[in-house]
Amino acid sequence: MSPPDPSPLSLRPAAEAEVGLVVDMIRSMVSDMGVFGPDPICEDEEPWAEVSERVETEITAPSHLFLVAEAAETPIGLVEARRERTHAVFAPKELLHVSAVYVRPEHRRRGVATQLLRETLTWGKEQGCVEAQLNTLATNPARQLYASLGFADVRTEMRRQL
């Protein structure tokens, strides 16, 4: 286990001017997922322009949370989450969907993701959400963290080659 960061950690919502920072962290997360996942990462820039446009629209939306972790005033982690309702064919309930959890590699295993997720869960509860959900790869080492925070497997995606 890595030693704790010497700098105190602070959490704050991403500022509207930080779209580039948010997209950079999401891009780093997706790149890391390429190591664990079955799908190769697209090298084209076009999808990232779309991600940037989406973040620009959602960064100030009250139904979305972009939470930045900082150490010594340097951004080291991010959570992206949103409030949503179940699909109309299911009994209605408010859900907290965690879309992204990322901590820069040199700051991992120091409790940063745990603090980001706990704060995100608190935000979701304050928003009226009754359940939190996230998607992760079966081989992602962060699954242990998610389980320690009470997340459990409820669905399985199955694939086969054609």
Image (spheres, rainbow, N blue to C red):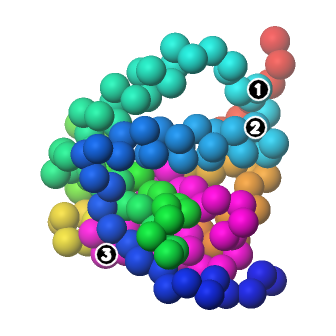
Q: Which residue is mark 3?
A: 122
Taking depth in this image into account, of 34 and 138 the one nearest to the observer is 34
Q: Secondary structure at mark 3?
A: helix
Mark 3 or mark 1: which comes first in sequence? 1
Q: Amino acid at mark 2?
A: Gly
Q: Which residue is mark 1?
A: 40
**Residue occupying image coordinates x 50% and y 75%:** 72
Mark 3 vs 2: CB contact within 8 A? no
Numbered circle sitting on residue 34: 2
Q: Is residue 156 above or below residue 144?
A: above
**Location of residue 34 in the rendering, given as x and y in whole percent from the top left corner:** 75, 37
Q: CA distance from mark 3 to mark 2?
A: 30 Å
Magenta-drawn segment: 95-123
Q: Quadrant of the N terminus?
A: bottom right
Q: Secondary structure at mark 2?
A: helix
Q: Amino acid at mark 1?
A: Pro
Q: Amino acid at mark 3?
A: Thr
